[in-house]
Image (spheres, rainbow, N blue to C red):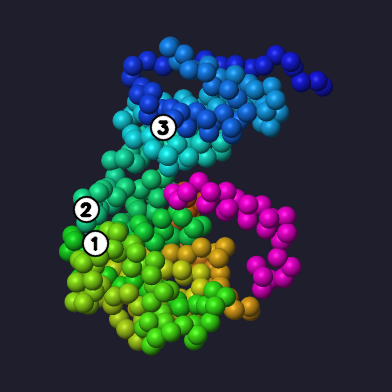
Amino acid sequence: MERSTELKKKTIPLDDSVDRRELFGGMDQNLRNIEGMFGVTIIQRSDGLLILEDGDRAIRTEDGVEHAAAIINEMIATIRKGEVLDQQKVGYITDLTENGISYSRQTENAELDKEIICFTHDGKPLRPKTIGQKDYVRTIRDKDIVFGIGPAGTGKTYIAVAMAVQAYKNKDVQKIILARPAVEAGERLGFLPGDLQEKVDPYLRPLYDALYDVLGRESALRLKEKEIIEVVPLAYMRGRTLDNSFIILDEAQNTTPEQMKMFLTRMGFGSKVVVTGDITQIDLPRGKRSGLIEARKVLRDVDDIGFCFLREVDVVRHQLVKKVISAYDRYYKAHPPKDEEEK
């Protein structure tokens, strides 16, 4: 059946309730991105926008005009709700719309922009940026042990640290414990310079970065000197019982089942535990099982333990991070691991 030669078009009316500069983006970048994505041409008019199918590019996607119009209408609805339409949110709206999900309907009761996790040292409010992050925040508030599992860039560690800082400020806990397994990702720990603490510090750097961003470097170091905040390798947790503490285990996909059990049993009275990890980036030696993967199976039916699964759509880093994750997912689906160890 031959493709119709008549090009599709759609008009989107605009009134004074919509800030065109915010909708279009700097240098009309939002519109240009939509044009490139769906093979359409967007013409600005005094009363609105005209979306035209581009005959040379429209073959790349069916219903490109409808897709483009749906995203623009979601962006308009977002502006009318009073939300800030920044680059991250535009990308999130685009991803949801492409998956048949309406951002405005999904956030009708979630009110992302009204939710504040905490304020940074310079007074900046930290908010969840996606529905997945919102659910993650709620689960941490409601459950004593929470597993945050998802790809890089979804805010698993950052949100957990922010929640820990807020819990300390609210005097819900007396200490913050941040732990990571010191697993060698293709490099040899023994060849690094310095003593043991200096060798493992690079593995703990992401936790320090999150602390410095939320608390400020001086405040974080001062609390660390007072041992109110501890940033330690996982091995240092053995034999301890931690009461009235907010305990975070980061990069948990690199724990063994024995290490995971050891960590979870450190929890004392008045404490909260958050475990974060990305099961697609396991650096354990061949033949070693991931404690995070096993914990999903063992603990999924235990009351007061919550599991939050963040997805590619929850990535809040550069848009290229999402593309990298998608490319790897497609590759591994087309070239599945040959044996169980590789899985």
Q: Picture coordinates of residue 333 (x, y %)?
A: 69, 55
Mark 1–mark 2 contact, CB under 8 Å?
Answer: yes
- C-alpha separation, residue under disc 1 versus residue under disc 2: 8 Å
Q: Which mark is residue 168?
A: none
* Marker count (numbered): 3
Q: Residue at x 58, y 53 (%)?
A: 324
Chain-order first, disc 1 or disc 2: 2
Identity of the residue drawn at 23% across and 71% down: 221
Q: Is residue 296 above or below residue 112?
A: below
| Extent of the magenta region | 316-343
Residue that mark 2 sits on:
122
Foreground label between 3 and 1: 3
Question: Which numbered circle lies on residue 26?
Answer: 3
Q: Callout 3: 10 Å neighbours few (<14), some, many (20+)?
A: few
Task: Look at the numbered disc 3 and give the secondary structure of its residue.
Answer: helix
Q: Secondary structure at mark 2?
A: loop
The residue sitting at 47% across, 65% down in the picture is 277
Q: Residues within 10 Å of mark 2 (few under 14, many from 20)?
A: few
Q: Could you tell me which quadrant the C terminus lies in? A: bottom right
Image location of residue 191, percent across then percent down: 50, 85
The answer to which of 135 and 184 lies nearer the viewer is: 184
Amino acid type at mark 3:
Gly
Q: Which residue is mark 1?
A: 216
Which quadrant of the view contains residue 293? bottom right
Crowd tier of the residue under label 1, counting other residues whose Cα lies within 10 Å: few below 14, some 14–19, many 20 or above? some
Q: Are marks 3 and 2 in contact (CB under 8 Å)?
A: no
